[in-house]
Image (cartoon, rainbow, N blue to C red):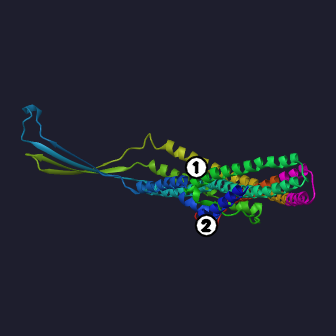
């Protein structure tokens, strides 16, 4: 008994002394700055800036040269020779370069919006992982406290048995329950270790450094459903990305139209012939005639893509509407569930304490005592889960509404 009690106290003290207390706001900041998947997504978004560099470049001029010193009629022997130097400089028409730059800039904005959407989606994973660890820590602390309280009950039962106020069978029934308490304790330890490892990986931290702040009831969320829907459609990252995609597709249409206009190439050539002639110079212009290929296919394809972008925007706005409504309903329901669990827990706790007092002072049926003990533990777990679920559904409501989870503006 004493060994278990001291080890439990030592375990809790170790958590508090050597683990860094990590609030949810701190976890969000750590996640956004150090998560591997988000780093990869950020690096992927950075690639779009390379497209702007490419778009700003102009076509390269081409240079060609030749030297002739052959006479087939005189067995390849000749005193005459010819040297030619030719330079071509392509000139883009139709504002192709401006259209490319505009298209690249629109794509950069789209990539940034999509990166924000990636962060929003990944935050759902963090929410589940963080609050699962918080639930595990609470359950472990409760199981240690319950096991300690049960030791006191066993001590009372042993004293009553020694004085003839309790049968040996009833005493053994109580002692058998120790197995259940020990099982809960070990399961909670294992769950905490596993879930802490998962959270540590998401945060790119050492699991030994993670101890979360004690769970507390979240503040009541006061915004109405209609306000949240309107805010989500105007500010949620996937809605912004869908709106930006329309600009991207419009810029793509203009670029393909510009690509339909042929370019011209201006050439300058010098020629040296010896020994009869001196130097000659000339200039030439070449331009393809757009008789057959006028880029019709690419233009039509870009127009269809623009129509798809418009349809995707309507879908995204509708999806935001639906997800906010679902989250709002779940939040309201979870508030009621928590209130019920809180009331039930208080009643179960009072009943447990009352039954224990009666058992200690005079006598009571062991079955009634065990029922009270089980009811209390069940409501204790349910209350913990109700608080956890309330935090989770509130976080989901914020994310689905496009609201930040914390006061940080990093995402």
289 vs 394: above or below? above
Q: What span is in magenta?
A: 346-375
Image-based side of 325 in relation to 78, left or right: right
Q: Which is nearer the eye, 295 or 351?
A: 351
Give x and y (percent) for residue 154.
Answer: 81, 54
Give x and y (percent) for residue 121.
Answer: 62, 53
Image-quadrant location for residue 219: bottom right
Image-based side of 370 in relation to 331, left or right: right
Q: Which is nearer the eye, 229 or 161?
A: 161
For the residues bearing labels 2 and 1, Cβ distance under 8 angstroms: no
Give x and y (percent) for residue 350.
Answer: 87, 61
Image-quadrant location for residue 276: top left
Q: Is residue 344 covered in magenta?
A: no
Give x and y (percent) for residue 110.
Answer: 55, 56
Q: CA distance from mark 2 to mark 1?
A: 35 Å
Which residue was labeled with disc 1? 306
Q: Residue at x 53, y 58 (%)?
A: 34
**Could you tell me which quadrant the C terminus lies in?**
bottom right
Q: Secondary structure at mark 2?
A: loop
| For discs 2 and 1, the disc positioned in front in the rendered view | 2
């Amino acid at each position: 008994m004493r060994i278990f009690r001291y080890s439990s106290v030592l375990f809790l003290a170790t958590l508090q002394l050597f683990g860094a207390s990590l609030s949810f706001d701190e976890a969000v900041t750590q996640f956004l700055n150090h998560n591997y998947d988000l780093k990869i997504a950020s690096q992927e978004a950075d690639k779009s800036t390379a497209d702007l560099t490419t778009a700003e470049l102009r076509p390269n001029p081409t240079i060609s040269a030749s030297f002739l010193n052959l006479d087939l009629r005189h067995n390849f022997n000749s005193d005459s020779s010819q040297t030619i130097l030719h330079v071509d400089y392509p000139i883009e028409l139709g504002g192709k370069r401006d259209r490319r730059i505009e298209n690249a800039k629109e794509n950069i904005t789209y990539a940034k919006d999509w990166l924000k959407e990636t962060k929003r989606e990944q935050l759902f994973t963090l929410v589940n992982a963080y609050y699962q660890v918080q639930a595990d820590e609470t359950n472990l602390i409760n199981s240690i406290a319950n096991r300690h309280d049960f030791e006191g009950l066993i001590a009372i039962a042993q004293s009553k048995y020694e004085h003839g106020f309790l049968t040996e069978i009833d005493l053994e029934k109580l002692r058998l329950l120790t197995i259940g308490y020990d099982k809960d304790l070990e399961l909670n330890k294992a769950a905490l270790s596993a879930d802490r490892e998962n959270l540590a990986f998401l945060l790119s931290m050492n699991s030994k450094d993670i101890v979360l702040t004690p769970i507390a009831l979240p503040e009541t969320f006061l915004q109405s459903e209609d306000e949240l829907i309107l805010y989500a459609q105007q500010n949620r990252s996937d809605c912004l990305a869908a709106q930006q995609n329309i600009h991207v597709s419009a810029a793509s249409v203009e670029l393909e139209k510009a690509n339909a206009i042929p370019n011209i190439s201006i050439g300058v050539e010098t020629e040296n012939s010896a020994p009869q002639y001196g130097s000659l110079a000339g200039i030439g212009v070449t331009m393809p005639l757009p008789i057959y290929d006028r880029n019709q296919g690419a233009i039509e394809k870009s127009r269809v893509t623009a129509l798809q972008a418009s349809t995707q925007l309507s879908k995204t706005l509708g999806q935001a509407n639906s997800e906010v409504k679902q989250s709002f309903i779940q939040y309201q329901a979870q508030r009621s569930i928590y209130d019920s669990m809180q009331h039930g827990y208080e009643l179960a706790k009072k009943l447990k304490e009352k039954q224990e007092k009666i058992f200690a002072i005079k006598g009571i049926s062991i079955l009634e005592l065990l029922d009270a003990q089980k009811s209390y533990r069940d409501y204790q777990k349910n209350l913990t889960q109700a608080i956890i679920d309330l935090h989770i559904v509130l976080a989901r409501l914020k994310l689905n509404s496009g609201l930040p989870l914390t006061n940080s503006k990093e995402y």
